[in-house]
Image: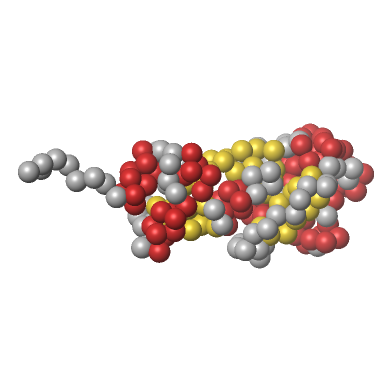
Amino acid sequence: MNKGKVAETASERAVRLIKKKGTTIIRTAQALQVGIHPRTLYQLRDNGVLEQVSRGVYRLSEQPYFSQPDLVTVALRIPKGIICLVSALAFHELTTQIPHTVSIALAKGAQSPRIDYPPVSVHRFSGASLKTGIEVYEIDEVPIRIYSAEKTLADCFKFRNKLGMDVVLEALKLYKTRKKFNPRQLIEYARICRVEAAMKPYLEVLV
């Protein structure tokens, strides 16, 4: 009688391959590339082994939960999006506001994202205003694109009528207390966002 190793099940193989991948996150497309059928992912999800982060994105349930679940989910679902405005202010600790949606910048003409959760507000940027000032942070093994503190302040000034001047001025004051306070860079981004003339008087008071 052959007492060899018992063949692993499709679910066991899938978990082994996900762990071997060296990450807690896997997309359906990535699973297909290594021979994991979507049906197996659904079984693992239903059995509590995997958690569905968002449509087509899974993580091992045994791992600690995301430190920034909303930002990570949005970055996974909308990789071309850039975290901006109040969401970026919150990330850079430049506001006491609690964002109720994740604000992202997308190019004009880009397809609007379909995402169930978290709620997302899309802002259309173009040219240098879209492409400059992007920083990439790896959070929970996921690269997240976020505008720098200085670029975010210039953007908030551009959207001041929508956000409210109290939010913008609070952000400027909090930024002034930083060791890396850089008024020259602020003016550079204000120029790119075409708010230099409007922003300068407030910046001069802070300086």
Instruction: Report the label total.
Output: 0
Picture colour scheme? secondary structure
Task: Determine which quarter of the picture holds residue 45.
Answer: bottom left
Please tell me which residue lies in front, 204 or 120: 120
Give the position of the C terminus as an image quadrant.
top right
Please tell me which residue lies in front, 52 or 31: 31
Visible in this render: residue 103? Answer: no
Task: Determine which quarter of the picture holds residue 146.
Answer: top right
Please tell me which residue lies in front, 158 or 184: 158
User: What residue is at 67 percent from the left and 55 percent from the top?
Assistant: 87
User: What residue is at 68 percent from the left and 58 percent from the top?
Assistant: 114
Q: Is residue 95 left or right of residue 190?
A: left
Residue 189: % across, % down: 80, 38
Visible in this render: residue 40? Answer: yes
User: What residue is at 47 percent from the left and 52 percent from the top?
Assistant: 38
Give the position of the N terminus as an image quadrant.
top left
Residue 93: % across, % down: 62, 52
Residue 182: % across, % down: 72, 36
Q: Is residue 193 left or right of residue 1?
A: right
